[in-house]
Image (cartoon, rainbow, N blue to C red):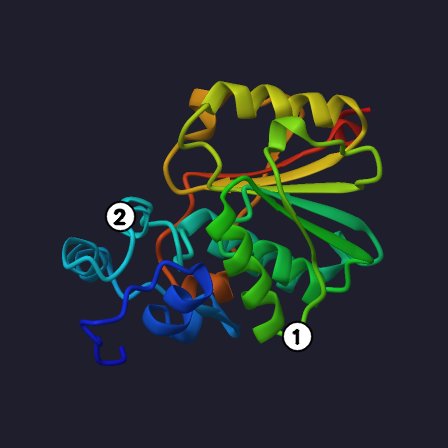
C-alpha cells in the first residue's frame, strides 16, 4: 500500500481504488484473473477513522474480494466454456465482476454485469479493463432489470440479504426459459429448495487449489426436466 498523505482526502471512488486497492491475483482458483484487491477490513476502518476515506469503504467489506461462491462459479465457467460460448450472459450482484469476466474469457457473445452499488460498478469497470474483457456494466437492481435478451443468468453469493426475493427472482427466470447458474458459501441448497435444480461439483483440479467447497452450487434449468 502507498504511504498515506495526511493532507489528502480521497472522496473520489477512482482515487480510493488507485490508492488503497492494489491489483493482485483474484483467487487461488483463478490464476488467470487479476482484480483490484482489498487491503483488509481493519486497514479500511483505520483509514476511515483517520478521515482519509469515507466510512462506506469500511462498512462494505465486499469491495475488492472474491467469495467462495464466486470463485467456484468463475472457475466452473472457465473449465466448461461450452456452457456460455456464444451465449448472452447477465451476471447479477456482480460485485468485483469476477464471474462476468470469466464468462467473457470463456467466449460468451455478450456479458452484462449488474450491480446496484455505484462503487462496485467502478470496480467492475476497472477489473474488466485489467483483464482485457468487454462487459456491459449496469448500475441497477436485479429486481428492476429486463432479462428478455439473456440466455444465461449467473448469480454468485447473492443470498445474503433479501434471500427469498432472490430465490423468487431466479425461479421466475427459469420459468421464462433461462438457464441460471448460482453458487454461495453461506446458504445451503436444502434451505432454499430451488426448483428445477441440478447440483454442480467443483472439479478435482479445482479442489487441489482450494479445498473449501461452496455450500450451494447449482444449475437451474427447466429444460433439464422436460
Q: Quadrant of the C terminus?
A: top right
Give the residue drawn at x 36%, y 37%: 186
Residue at 56 percent of width and 58 percent of height: 124
Instruction: Give x and y (percent) for residue 45.
Output: 19, 54
5 lies left or right of 156:
left
Does residue 185 appear to the left or right of 176 in the view shown? left
Rendered view: 99 above or below 160: below
Quickly name the residue at label 2. Answer: 55
Query: Which residue reaches farthest bottom?
Result: 3
Contact between labelled residues 2 and 1, with CB atoms less than 8 Å apart: no
Instruction: Report which quarter residue 221 is drawn in.
Output: top right
- Secondary structure state at the residue bearing disc 2: loop
Q: Is residue 177 left or right of residue 174?
A: right
Q: Up-down: is 21 above or below 213?
A: below
- Residue 170 can be seen in this image: no
- SS category of the residue bearing label 1: loop
Residue 14 lies, in percent from the top left, at 46, 65
Q: Which mark is residue 132?
A: 1
Amino acid at each position: 500500500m502507498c504511504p498515506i498523505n495526511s493532507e489528502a482526502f480521497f472522496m473520489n471512488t477512482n482515487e480510493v481504488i488507485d490508492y488503497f486497492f492494489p491489483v493482485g491475483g483474484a483467487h487461488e482458483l483463478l490464476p488467470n484473473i487479476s482484480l483490484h484487491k482489498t487491503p483488509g477490513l481493519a486497514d479500511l476502518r483505520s483509514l476511515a477513522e483517520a478521515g482519509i476515506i469515507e466510512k462506506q469503504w469500511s462498512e462494505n467489506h465486499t469491495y475488492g474480494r472474491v467469495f467462495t461462491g464466486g470463485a467456484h462459479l468463475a472457475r466452473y465457467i472457465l473449465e466448461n466454456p461450452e456452457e456460455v460460448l456464444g451465449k448472452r450472459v447477465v451476471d447479477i450482484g456482480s460485485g468485483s465482476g469476477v464471474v462476468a469476466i470469466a464468462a467473457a474469457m470463456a467466449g460468451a457473445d455478450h456479458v452484462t454485469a449488474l450491480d446496484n452499488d455505484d462503487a462496485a460498478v467502478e470496480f467492475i469497470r476497472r477489473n474488466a479493463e485489467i483483464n482485457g474483457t468487454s462487459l456491459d456494466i449496469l448500475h441497477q437492481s436485479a429486481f428492476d432489470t429486463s432479462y428478455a435478451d439473456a440466455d444465461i443468468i449467473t448469480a454468485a453469493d447473492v443470498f445474503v440479504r433479501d434471500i427469498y426475493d432472490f430465490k423468487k427472482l431466479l425461479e421466475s427466470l427459469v420459468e421464462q426459459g433461462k438457464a441460471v447458474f448460482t453458487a454461495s458459501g453461506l446458504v445451503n441448497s436444502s434451505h432454499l429448495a430451488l426448483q428445477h435444480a441440478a447440483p454442480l461439483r467443483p472439479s478435482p483440479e479445482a479442489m487441489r487449489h482450494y479445498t473449501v467447497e461452496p455450500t450451494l452450487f447449482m444449475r437451474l434449468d427447466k429444460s433439464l426436466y422436460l
